[in-house]
Image (cartoon, rainbow, N blue to C red):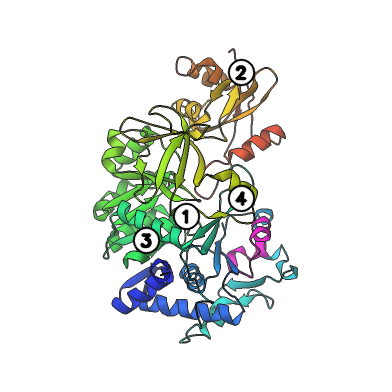
Amino acid sequence: MIKSMNIAWWVKRWSELHPQKAAVIFEGNQISYLELHQRVNRACCWLQTLGIEKGDRVAVMLNNCPEFLELFLACSRMGALFVPINYRLAAPELEYTLTNSRPRLFVFGEEFADTVLSLELNSRRPLMLLAGIAGSAISDAILDYRGESAACEGQQPFLTDLLAPAVPEEAHVIMYTSGTTGQPKGAVLSHRKTFFNCLNADIFFKLHFDDIMLIVLPLFHSGGLFIQASPVIYKGATMILHKSFDPHRTYRDIRKYQVTKFLGVPTVYKSLVKAETKHKTALSSLKVCAIGGEKLTPELMAQFRGAGFSLRQIMGQTETSILLWAHEKDVVRKPGSVGKPVFHAEVRIVDRQGRPSDPGQVGEIVVRGSIMMTEYWQDPVKTEDTIRGGWLHTGDLARMDDDGYFYLIDRAKDMFISGGENVYPAEIERVLRKHPAVEDIAVVGVPDESWGEVGCAFVMAKPGADLKSEDLIRFCDGQLARYKWPKKILVAEDFPRTALGKVRKSVLRENYLGKDIVALTIEHGAAPV
């Protein structure tokens, strides 16, 4: 039955079993499961008045807010495809995503009105309806979500087997990748995938009915929506929803609401550590603290532990959500490891021929099972390139030890070949991050007449540090084989990043090749090899 795998039905069920239980707390306001169910009904009825049907796409570009959840759940109930959009996108990036997904309806927050209205979306064919969420009407041409949906208060949506999801394999969400290696791809995620992601998160977080989960990650991303919000609803627990991340507000609400479960990316924990001096006692209620989103060094994990965060680690991607996990003891016992495969999936490392790799051998992580995406939206070529023989190829290179723990090496697309030798940028970055003048670093492969490709290191210096390219090159001596040494050093004030803080290396590479290097001040000549 689709009901048991439909997140909107979970809300309905909890509204019957525990109607007054707090589902969402947002900016001090509490929304019970009964009220959330009523809001979802109201949103469903409003969508139906607009002619939204099963299979239509509904895109949203919103900060974390109850309306985001209402529309997500309403689409889930109706069988419309929910398309969460990164609110940090520039106008051309937003236009690409909307052109690719072709939603019947696009709902956005008033803070993004200038970007949205600059695209003149009302003139699109086929017609795209626009709705705003604002304190007052944005313009006469923009529907008012709050005002119009309120007129549907108390109504029940008309749903039949033909007007709602019928089987678990039906599409639920189109979630766009971060685009670290080019144009974003729309991963089509089924209701079954959402359900099994929740089961995995349930095990990982040890979720209970009385848990309080604080969500500071954006809901447009898998971490916020599928690893936190959806599992909380599945268990009938309570989520504290923050519009955006603020370290002091995070500590305050952990103490105020006695938060028990939390997930952050490294950038979040770095900010919390910097602000932690007067907030140390706030962490006493936390039973599980998790981290994910990008590759972590043992040194950084040790720094977080020293600040009072005993962390579990997760690793995943948009196409699968959680793939690998490491518990607190594993993080200490197996430094650098991202753990073992999740319960509800098959995960392995394979060589170029698709054969399972031996322990210690570097290969690509592949996965199959109910947590993998169905396809890339409107892109059969990339779908066939990614899903081969029933296995989803993640593009992540890793090795496994004799105990079955995975260790990330690098992205397959980041690896370059210099003089016939494979070079993994993450290995170079790990060494150069130890240099006392380096705040952050990103290494990419760039063309070279002599060696085919060489490493180009983009470096952020620590405030006040005297960073010399020659010092960085010398720092590699004795720690890296000479063919791995970066041949060019470019110093930058900041890096282009995704919403979760991952460096967009494709943009750095394009900037280098096009010589569109802004605020890059040093170029180091070829080092001896």
Residue positioned 37% across, 61% down in the render: 231
Frontmost residue, 59 versus 260: 59
Name the residue carrying label 4: 184
Q: Secondary structure at mark 2?
A: loop
- What number is the disc on residue 222? 1
Quarter occupied by residue 303 = top left
Left or right of 85, for residue 140:
right
Q: Amino acid at mark 1?
A: Ser
Q: Amino acid at mark 3?
A: Pro
Residue positioned 35% across, 30% down in the render: 401
- What number is the disc on residue 419? 2
Q: Which residues are magenta?
A: 95-116
Looking at the picture, does residue 228 appear above or below residue 406?
A: below
Q: Position of residue 143 (x, y in %)?
A: 63, 77
- Badges 3 and 1: C-beta atoms under 8 Å apart? no
Label 3 and label 1: CA atoms lie apart by: 12 Å
- What number is the disc on residue 231? 3
Q: Which mark sits nearer the N-terminus, 3 or 2? A: 3
Q: Amino acid at mark 2?
A: Gly
Label 2 and label 4: CA atoms lie apart by: 32 Å
Q: Position of residue 271 (x, y in %)?
A: 41, 46
Label 4: few (<14), some or many (≥20) within 10 Å?
A: some
Q: Secondary structure at mark 4?
A: loop
Assign the N terminus to one quadrant of the image.
bottom left
Q: Which mark sits nearer the N-terminus, 3 or 1? A: 1
Left or right of 209, for residue 182:
right
